[in-house]
């Protein structure tokens, strides 16, 4: 995420492919195997054998318990849910820009991590119309953001299951104390979805915590003449009467907070990187920005630079979305296709959000406490970009920030320990986080630092990582004791000497 005010008050805020979906980690299961869309998703029709659901033939398993309503995040304890691991979402959405109504069907393929008699999904502001589990009607209770689904039969630990949830209503944005918004945001001609950290539950039910990543199919039906952009690759575009559907496929695992839908009128630019990655960028036709292509024209250059710095690009698609969204003065690293408001669409923000494809989207924080692993590295990417392109060196960036007075908000708390949820996107996480990265570079030297960064993105590619994972990896990979950096810069209170 990147804002137009240097992050001092960020809110908590036709290409066709046939790639198989990936699971989030070894042993997770078959990714999107058996995933459905369209009629099957709406009706809950089975697609194949449901192995292991009820044990022996004819037996009905009744040994489950309700799963936890929350993933146990230190800052958002009710966000996410326990008891299962999602492997794939198939979202079928129909949106009316005039009324703002959204009709949705979410097919959620998951694996039980404990014996379940019921499980929860996060959904805020929309009405659940029905739910099934493995084709059988399930009981539903919806209170606040918690949707509790009680299947007809209990689900055994280790068993794969599918839940289909039909829902509808007018999605509402989530407004924070400073007036900034996230979630489903209406625009003049459509809408755009921002999900960090809680906004995705405003437009689809799911396990909305970064610790549970999945592959996605997102199909959006809109009035003819309106476009719908999402993550990954465009698999199909179909017209039926006065409606048009866009089917996007995100093969690699994705945390729900970087899922997006952008609906409106766009100028679509397509190309390929030198390494063969398809690039689809969408610029709002009313934005009036980058008319000479000065920013988008540099995208291949930025991609190649980032791959040299951070390692192979981790996804099968790339691009940007430039949109008009009122009260959203920040960009977001939506996976494969960062969303950047028109008034802050410039090269620095493209560099920042593209770096997040490695730091945050591929290597995803285990909890929101680990946010500096996203923002510290993405901010340092800006410093590396200017250093490599005739501007300020990373050392000069570091020195300017270190020169700030001891009472500057940059030193309010250690980057690895934001005091509250409202602090996870403040200056110490971004800028002091980048300073931690620079101190590591100073200690190791450029060659060893370069190897460390590329090794880190490869080791945890499409996985999760905590701050402890990173500090352990850095010391093991380099054979260096880096405790002085961790003690002073990562965990130390106040301005380091």
Image (tube, rainbow, N blue to C red):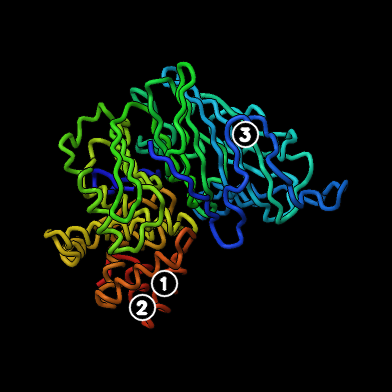
Nearer to us: label 3 or label 1: 3
Q: Is residue 368 left or right of residue 347?
A: right
- Give the residue at mark 2: 482
- Give the residue at mark 1: 471
Give x and y (percent) for residue 426: 33, 52
Up the image or down, 34 lies above or below 188; here it is below
Viewer-proximal residue, 181 or 311? 311
Q: Is residue 193 left or right of residue 166?
A: left
* Identity of the residue drawn at 62% across and 56% down: 29
Determine which quarter of the picture holds residue 185.
top left
Viewer-proximal residue, 325 or 263? 263
Q: Is residue 162 visible?
A: yes
Q: Is residue 65 left or right of residue 480?
A: right
Viewer-proximal residue, 120 or 58? 58
Up the image or down, 226 lies above or below 86; here it is above
Residue 287 got which mark? none
Give x and y (percent) for residue 261: 42, 35
Quick one: SS at disc 3? helix
The first of marks 3 and 1 along the sequence is: 3
- Give the residue at mark 3: 41
């Amino acid at each position: 995420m990147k804002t137009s005010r240097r992050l001092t008050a960020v809110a908590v805020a036709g290409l066709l492919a046939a790639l198989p979906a990936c699971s989030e980690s070894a042993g997770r299961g078959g990714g999107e195997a058996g995933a459905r869309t369209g009629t099957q998703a709406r009706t809950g029709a089975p697609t194949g054998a449901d192995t292991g659901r009820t044990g022996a033939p004819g037996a009905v398993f009744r040994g489950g318990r309700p799963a936890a309503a929350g993933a146990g995040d230190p800052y958002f304890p009710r966000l996410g849910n326990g008891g299962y691991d999602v492997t794939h979402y198939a979202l079928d959405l129909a949106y009316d820009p005039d009324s703002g109504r959204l009709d949705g069907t979410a097919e959620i393929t998951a694996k039980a991590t404990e014996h379940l008699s019921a499980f929860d999904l996060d959904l805020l502001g929309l009405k659940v119309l029905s739910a099934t589990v493995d084709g059988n009607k399930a009981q539903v209770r919806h209170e606040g953001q918690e949707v509790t689904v009680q299947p007809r039969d209990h689900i055994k630990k280790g068993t794969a299951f599918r839940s289909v949830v039909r829902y509808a209503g007018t999605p509402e944005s989530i407004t924070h104390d400073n007036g900034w918004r996230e979630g489903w945001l209406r625009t003049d001609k459509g809408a755009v979805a921002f999900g960090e950290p809680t906004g995705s539950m405003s437009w689809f039910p799911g396990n909305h915590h970064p610790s549970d990543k999945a592959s996605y199919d997102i199909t959006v039906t809109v009035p003819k003449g309106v476009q719908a952009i999402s993550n990954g690759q465009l698999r199909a575009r179909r017209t039926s009467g006065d409606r048009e559907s866009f089917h996007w496929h995100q093969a690699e695992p994705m945390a729900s907070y970087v899922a997006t839908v952008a609906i409106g009128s766009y100028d679509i630019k397509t190309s390929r990187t030198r390494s063969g990655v398809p690039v689809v960028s969408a610029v709002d036709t009313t934005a009036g920005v980058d008319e000479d292509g000065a920013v988008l024209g540099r995208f291949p250059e930025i991609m190649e630079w980032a791959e040299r710095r951070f390692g192979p690009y981790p996804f099968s698609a790339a691009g940007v979305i430039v949109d008009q969204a009122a009260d959203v003065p920040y960009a977001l690293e939506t996976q494969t296709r960062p969303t950047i408001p028109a008034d802050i669409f410039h090269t620095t923000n493209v560099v920042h959000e593209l770096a997040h494809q490695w730091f945050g989207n591929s290597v995803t924080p285990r909890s929101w406490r680990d946010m500096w692993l996203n923002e510290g590295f993405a901010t340092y990417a800006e410093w590396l970009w200017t250093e490599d392109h005739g501007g300020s060196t990373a050392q000069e960036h570091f020195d300017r920030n270190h020169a700030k007075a001891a009472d500057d908000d940059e030193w309010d708390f250690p980057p690895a320990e934001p005091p509250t949820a409202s602090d996870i996107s403040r200056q110490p996480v971004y800028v002091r986080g980048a300073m931690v990265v620079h101190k590591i570079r100073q200690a190791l030297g450029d060659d060893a630092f370069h190897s460390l960064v590329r090794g880190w993105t490869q080791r945890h590619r499409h996985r999760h990582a905590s701050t402890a994972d990173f500090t352990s990896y850095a010391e093991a990979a380099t054979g260096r004791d880096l405790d002085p950096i961790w003690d002073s810069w990562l965990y130390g209170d106040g301005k380091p000497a």
